[in-house]
Amino acid sequence: GDFAFSAESGTVLMYELNWYDSGQLVPDQVTPASDELPLVDSGTGVAGISTSYSRGDHIHPQQLTCDSDIIATKFIMTDRTNNDILLGNGDTTTLDSKLSRILIRNFSYIFGIYKIGNGKYNQNSGN
């Protein structure tokens, strides 16, 4: 069909049986993603310089509070222990569960990392 740009509304008018406002924006009235600042919820983030709508180089601020003594146990969720593993769906399991033994064995196989008797890890050993 025919179409026209409306300077008044900034949208595209379409014609089938009658003229109607399609609601589509006139291309030169659209603000490019590179000119838009992303919405920020809380904290300080960095927008990045990518010009695509989904900016691949944006940075989220970490919600961590640590002193100079950084050890892994400081990053354990509240009300959890250092034996808990957080799963992708939000559930947790423990290191001694059958599921985590299967996962650890499979990941060790996939990445070629194996624990040997003295507690050290070896990338080439199958033991």
Image (spheres, rainbow, N blue to C red):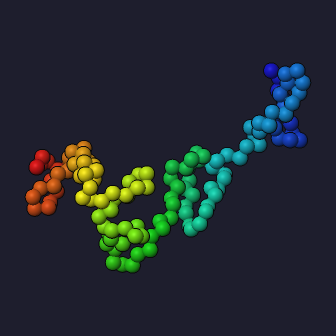
Camera sees residue 26: no
When asked about the image quadrant of residue 115, the answer is bottom left
When asked about the image quadrant of residue 87, the answer is bottom left
Measuring 64% from the left and 47% from the top, which residue is drawn there? 33
| Residue most extreme to the front | 98
Relative to 76, say whether 102 is above or below: above
State the quadrant of the N terminus.
top right
Camera sees residue 83: yes
Q: Please name whichever residue, 68 or 74, is drawn nearer the observer in this view of the structure.
A: 74
Q: Please name whichever residue, 61 or 119, is drawn nearer the observer in this view of the structure.
A: 119
Measuring from the top left, give residue 98's x and y in whole percent.
Answer: 25, 51
Measuring 55% from the left and 63% from the top, which residue is drawn there? 45
Measuring from the top left, give residue 110's x and y in whole percent.
Answer: 25, 44
Residue 70 is left or right of residue 109, and the answer is right
Residue 37 is left or right of residue 77, and the answer is right
Q: Across the whole image, how many numbered discs are drawn on residues?
A: 0
Measuring 86% from the left and 41% from the top, which residue is drawn there? 9
Measuring 22% from the left and 48% from the top, which residue is drawn there? 105
Measuring from the top left, give residue 46's x and y in whole percent.
Answer: 55, 61
Measuring from the top left, give residue 52's x and y in whole percent.
Answer: 58, 45
When asked about the image quadrant of residue 22, the answer is top right
